[in-house]
Image (cartoon, rainbow, N blue to C red):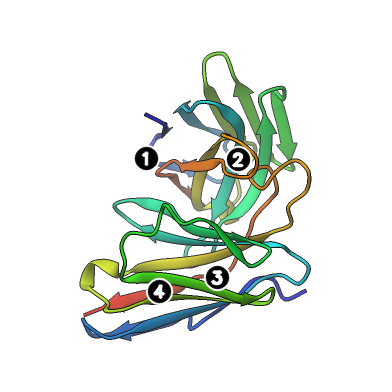
């Protein structure tokens, strides 16, 4: 298996532009997570999906951020309009939920997308 | 307030030496604790996951301990190698109900192993 795939790996854009990050989870996994990592705040969970349905989006910073999962093999995180403070590394992770619950199952992280907003 | 604090913030050791990283948490209700290793420029990789009933868990040269009474965990690295240079992140799960628990992340410890 290729693992979690994210694209692009690097994105540089100007303030006000729309940014779309993409993620392909591990085949067979039924949960997908979007994280943001900065030096100041560390890793933060933004949103997670279970069976393509958003379950908890309490970590999404504001309305400029939106995430979709149209099918089991693809998800997007969109920022519109982007701001310099959105600069960070965005990680996607996937997991297979068992009866133990999503927060016990191991999450597999992608390589991340480094976003720079000028 | 749910919090996870790691110490030290950074650490430099010589190759072959042992080291111990600390994680203190104030999370309720506690579900499980994980240690992740994150190499520079890559995503975190899980090392161990422990529930409250598990006191210790090993993964090769990595050994994690958990004291649920004092709410402390440690990650011990034995006979360090240059490839151990990375950030180590402690993550605690606060389980509320069903699958709607919350993950609380520590800020990480940056370990540098020198030859």
Q: Position of residue B12 (x, y in %)?
A: 42, 43
Q: Residue furthest top?
A: B69
Q: Residue B9 got which mark?
A: 1
Camera-side residue of A70 and A115: A70
Mark-to-mark CA distance, 2 and 3: 19 Å
Check the residue under mark 4 and report the chain it is in.
A
Q: Which mark is residue A114?
A: 4
For label 1, the crowd category at 10 Å Cα-Cα, with few meaning under 14, some 14 to 19 and many 20 or more, is: some
Q: In the rendering, at what x and y percent does residue B50 appear?
A: 68, 33
Estimate the x, y position of residue B104 in percent, counting from the top left. 47, 40
Residue at the spot x=52%, y=23% of the render? B72
Given the image, what chain letter belongs to the residue carrying mark 3?
A
Q: Which quadrant would residue A52 be assigned to in this image? A: bottom right
Looking at the rendered structure, the secondary structure element under dot 4 is: strand
Q: CA distance from mark 3 to mark 4?
A: 9 Å
What residue is rendered at 47% in x and 60% in y? A35
User: Which image quadrant for residue A109?
Assistant: bottom right
Q: CA distance from mark 4 to mark 1?
A: 23 Å
Identify the subunit bearing mark 2.
B
Residue A38, above or below A72: above
Pointer 2 residue: B34
Identify the subunit bearing mark 1.
B
């Amino acid at each position: 298996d290729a693992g979690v795939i994210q694209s692009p790996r690097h994105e540089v854009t100007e303030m006000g532009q729309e940014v779309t990050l993409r993620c392909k989870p591990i085949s067979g996994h039924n949960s997908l997570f979007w994280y943001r990592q900065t030096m100041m705040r560390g890793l933060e969970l933004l949103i997670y999906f279970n069976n393509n349905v958003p379950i908890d989006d309490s970590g999404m910073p504001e309305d400029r951020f939106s995430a979709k999962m149209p099918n089991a093999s693809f998800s997007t995180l969109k920022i519109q309009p982007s701001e310099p403070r959105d600069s960070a590394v965005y990680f996607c992770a996937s997991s297979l939920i068992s009866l133990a619950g999503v927060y016990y199952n191991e999450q597999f992280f992608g390589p991340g997308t480094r976003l720079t907003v000028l | 307030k749910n919090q996870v604090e790691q110490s030290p913030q950074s650490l430099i050791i010589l190759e072959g030496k042992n080291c111990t990283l600390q994680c203190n948490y104030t999370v309720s209700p506690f579900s499980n604790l994980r240690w992740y290793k994150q190499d520079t420029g890559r995503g975190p990789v899980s090392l161990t996951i422990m529930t409250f009933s598990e006191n210790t868990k090993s993964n090769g040269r990595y050994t994690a301990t958990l004291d649920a009474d004092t709410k402390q965990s440690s990650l011990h690295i034995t006979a360090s190698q240059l490839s151990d240079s990375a950030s180590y992140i402690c993550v605690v799960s606060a389980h509320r109900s069903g699958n709607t628990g919350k993950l609380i992340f520590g800020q990480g410890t940056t370990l540098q192993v020198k030859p």
